Image (cartoon, helix red, strand yellow):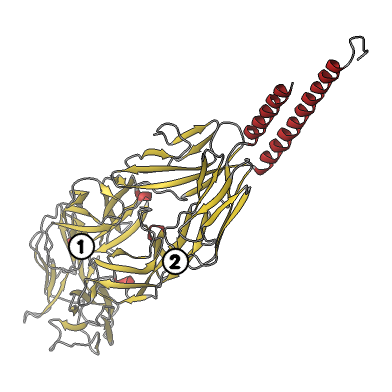
Amino acid sequence: MIFCTRWIQCCVTYFIFTAVGGFLVLTPPSLVVEYGGPASAVCSTNMTIQSMAWEASQGAVDITPGAQQLTWNVSSLTHWDIKPLCFVNKDIQGNQERQYLPVIVYKKPDNVSISLVNTTGPVVEGGSYQLKCDIQNVTPVHSVIVNWYKGRTLVKTDNEPSRETVKAPGNKNVSLLISPNRADDGAQYSCEAVLDLGAEGLHPPQRRSSGPVSIPVHYSPRFSSNVEFIEQNCQQVTLNCTVTANPPPKYTWKSPQLKSEPVNPVLTLPHPSSGNYTCKAWNAHGYEYKLFIITNSPDSVGGVLVLTPPRLVVEYGGPASAVCSTNMTIQSMAWEASQGSVDITPRAQQLTWNVSSLTHWDIKPLCFVIKDIQGTQERQYLPVIVYKYPDNVSISLVNHTGPVVEWGSYQLKCDIQNVAPVHSVKVHWYRGGTLVKIYNQPSRETVKEPQNTNDSLLINPNRADDGVQYSCEAVLNLGAEGFHPFQRRSLSGPLRIPVHYKPLFPHHQETVVDTGDAFTLNCTVRANPPARYSWTSAHLRHAESSAVITLHSSGLGNYTCTASNKYGSDRKVFTVTKKPGRVVFWSILGTGLGVALALVAGYGAYVLFIKEKSPSNSVI
């Protein structure tokens, strides 16, 4: 009977042990601590154990017999790579249960600064330059995200590849490639270091910004319009050639009607003569011309020539015509041109220049009249722009073989073939449907025939750019007399750029509650090429290589998933804990059931004992 009773008690004890579940619970399951700050965690168990202890390089707690919970506590944590371990000795044979406490020790950066590197001399429009952000004495370095700002606008975010190996403070620097234009003159750039320590980290994340760096941009003069027409009525005329440039431009004026070459941006003509006045603006980075054409008003007194229209924009091979007229009494009129000349016509008050198919690129039709028998002339040139659409516009990735990798620097090239006039071509760059850059060809006004031209775009793609389509567009901007709409556009085909990048988890820790049923740990993360997965845990009996694993009866503790491809790897730690309410419930239920069984067994034993001692005729 005594044997039977003890057997039942053993069964009850085992039932209670397994119902509660022999395990260690760490509260909190992980820690994020500032270097030099306090740290503590409680290790508890519902097992009947021999002893409990904390093993750690700082704050170790000696073996404590019979303890059900034990606190690890450090007033000032100064070990970077600390790995506190709670363990219990379950029995006199020395069988143990062990649980590591994940600890991230962080330190804010001492300093964040920004500078322009590898550059001597001024920053020039259209050039490529490198800004560097230096972040000093920070940890963990792999958790630092760098934001780049132009003014207050975020222009780029750099995520450092996560390695999880270096715990001590280190320095970090990242670069930003810029290709500034004149609109960026004086723009202020800054960088910001963000410590992103995951869900258990700082809320909001710790941020520290550099001071701003202001970048003056040097650029050549560029007129919004290269031709201006002015009608005069024998009154004073002012020609204003002022244009913005850095450094400020110098000016010169030329015209057959001028006896000298003025050097001021504004030219005042008290008694103007009709004709062409050319202004040249230049600095160390280039030059540009602007043509002022003065014509006499038809209502002015005296003999004049009027061209209708006053200028022409004609497609190569297309028709062209203009009428020259006068209100003077003249001897004769004629058109002089390399194509479509009109012979001298006596007494004509108007004369038409007409070409059915214009094929001369640099044509300069001239209407002139002979006013008297002495041969005195009045002359007027007709400005003609002959244009041709590009034969082809294409986009390509140049000077590169192999895949495009996140945060690398790459050059896209837009080739525009056989277009005229080349100085009127603007290049628009698009990322998807968004305009990202406009390039204006320097105006020279010297080359009229078709030419090839190209422009480049520097890109630093990230994972968000994977599969984005880039395109470029050639825009012929021929002024108010051009197309209606006045710009003719020729678009390249799209260039889709796959971007390769390593796995990077948005959060590196996740706590999962074991409800007692089967549950999953999902480690899926984006990467290109796709990530390979591996799992490590003291509770896994065989290797796992899936992104998602299913646990039916887990051991409580940490499960580490590593995702990797050829560009790097990243880790995520899942901490599996028991729901406290469930533990208490099963503990109470198990204890109650054990007591009930013990009472039943005791009562049965008592009855048998009484029967054995009582006489055979006893009622009992």
Where is residue 606 shown, x and y percent of the image? 82, 23
Where is residue 72 shown, x and y percent of the image? 56, 57
Callout 1 environment at 10 Å: few (<14), some (14 to 19), or many (20+)? some
Q: Which mark is residue 139?
A: none
Q: Is residue 44 visible?
A: yes
Q: Nearer the viewer, residue 223 or 40?
A: 40
Where 314 falls versus 47 (above or below)? Answer: below
Q: Quadrant of residue 246?
A: bottom left
Where is residue 552 shown, x and y percent of the image? 54, 30
Q: Gap between marks 1 and 2, in whole Å?
A: 77 Å
Where 383 falls versus 82 (above or below)? Answer: below
Q: Nearer the viewer, residue 600 or 308?
A: 600
Locate residue 523 relative to residue 223 in the image: left or right: right
Residue found at x 27% / y 77%: 230
Q: Amino acid under label 2? A: Lys
Q: Nearer the viewer, residue 167 or 76?
A: 76
Q: Which numbered mark, 1 or 2, is in the foreground of this view?
A: 2
Quadrant housing the N terminus: top right
Q: Earlier in the sequence, mark 1 or mark 2?
A: 2
Q: Residue furthest top?
A: 617
Q: Amino acid under label 1? A: Ala
Q: Which mark is residue 107?
A: 2
Q: For the residue labelled by badge 2, is the local secondary structure a helix, a strand or a loop?
A: loop
Where is residue 102 shown, x and y percent of the image? 48, 52
Q: Which residue is mark 1?
A: 322
Residue found at x 45% / y 50%: 506
Locate residue 87 relative to residue 333 in the image: left or right: right
